[in-house]
Amino acid sequence: MRYRWVSLALLLAPAAAFAAADGCSSAGTAEPPEASAPNAASEAGARLDAPADRIDADAASCTGTPPPAGVPGGWVLWPGYDSCCGFYVPSPNGSPPPPIAWGACDPVAPAGLVCQQMQVNWTAPTNEQWPLVVAAPAAQETDTVTLAVSRAVGGGWESLIADTDGPVRLAIFQAGACRLQPSGMDGSWYAFGVHLGASGGAFSGALTSFPTQLAINSQMPMALTIGQPGALDLKTMLLHSWDSPATPISVHAAADTGFLENFAVFSGSTLFWNASRACVSKFKVWTSAGGTADFLSFGDTNSTEGVGDIGTDGTDIVWTYGSGGCDPQTLLYNTVSIMTSPFSTTASGLQPRRLRSEIPNGLGVSPFVVDCGYAARQTSQGIRLVRLSDGVSWLLAADPSTPWEWEIPIALTCTELFAQVLVHNDGGLGSTQYTRVRLDSLGPGTPPD
């Protein structure tokens, strides 16, 4: 099996969707318990840095309360993260949520595209401007794309991990003060950030063995990057392995202190990420055997050239390369190119090849989605799709003649691009749509320059 992982910027829901009152917070710190064994569905998982009275009081104060109005019939309280959060999951007798549905794109879609958009096939509140939110990342196994979707329903929000053309794999109903933010996923594992007022945390585990294996209470909601070795906390650069989640591994190198480390992506057991400081930008790599090392670097003081936006599907690696000097005020390079190489875990194994130029502004802000010989990323002008064999590209830009504005690529297959678009209306607010477009309907493309 071949998986593709990609970390994208969060596609934010309306503020009301994730804002929450702090109904369960308390002080104190507990010693972490022993980590739960992998695939132990009956255990709540390893809880790290959690307030002691929050854990101990949950069962007494929240577990016995009846479900609030709006919780689907047959769904039961899940206390694996925090009973007071009001997370409910389907019981064996519960009604599963409907799968993702697709229909023809609105007539405002650009002419000539073979296009479908996600449908609201459940009862959504009539006053909700964004009844659904798709959050990155997406996961892919061959041609099966799996998405994290949040739906506005009566009485709360419903968070799903579901195949685009198949079953719902995981469903959580949010009826309490906490709000979920899908923050990581691959073909086997998932992660959710938790918002609880100004604080929060995260929980993560295997899709086949819910409840969770890893739960973390922290001072703020967390974003985790998920992969075969474990869950990476992007704020601390600590990797919580699935085998020993309570004993994290630091992937941060002391030499990179002062660098911003972000846009991490797993490929199998290998972790890549970007480290940047002003006009200095490089790629890092971590493996369990070799630890952390520079992957593609021009030195820690060289501001004349740099790299960003790394993405990979385990077959190809794609990135942006800035050269010709960098303006210290705007942090823009004079020249930006799109580069690719066959997959490698070492700098010596890279075979860089230039594909074409790229828009100068935005290097290092939008990683590539890569699969099946194509790569796509968000730019200031729309979505750039490039074919890796020859550098032919398509810029899906905003068209002044239509209200259709391309925003963020979500996933790629050999035949389709999945993307977020913004459809402007007469009132100026617009609505977010989630679409899938056949690649062979995009036209001949633009030759490389």
Image (tube, helix red, strand yellow):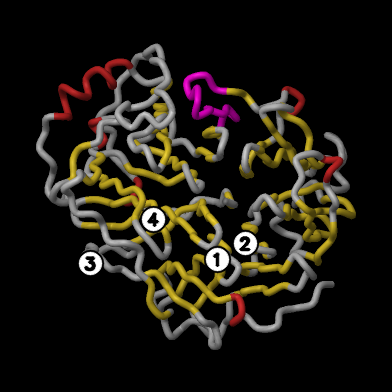
Q: Which residue is mark 2?
A: 378
Pick the residue in front: 13 or 284. 284
Can residue 97 be seen?
Answer: yes
Q: Position of residue 34 (x, y in %)?
A: 41, 15
Name the residue: 37% across, 33% down: 212
**In terms of sequence position, does the residue under pointer 3 or pointer 4 come before the other?**
3
Per the image, label 3 sits on a secondary structure element best described as loop
Q: Which residue is mark 3?
A: 126
| In this view, 308 is above or below 29 | below
Mark 4: amino acid: Ala
User: Does 385 sit left or right of 113 as displayed?
Assistant: right
Per the image, label 4 sits on a secondary structure element best described as strand
Q: Position of residue 448 (x, y in %)?
A: 81, 73
Mark 3: amino acid: Thr
Chief SS of the magenta region:
loop
Q: Residue furthest left?
A: 66
- Given this view, does label 4 or label 1 mark the residue nearer the observer? 4
Q: Position of residue 241 (x, y in %)?
A: 53, 28
Measured Cα–Cα span from mark 4 to mark 1:
22 Å
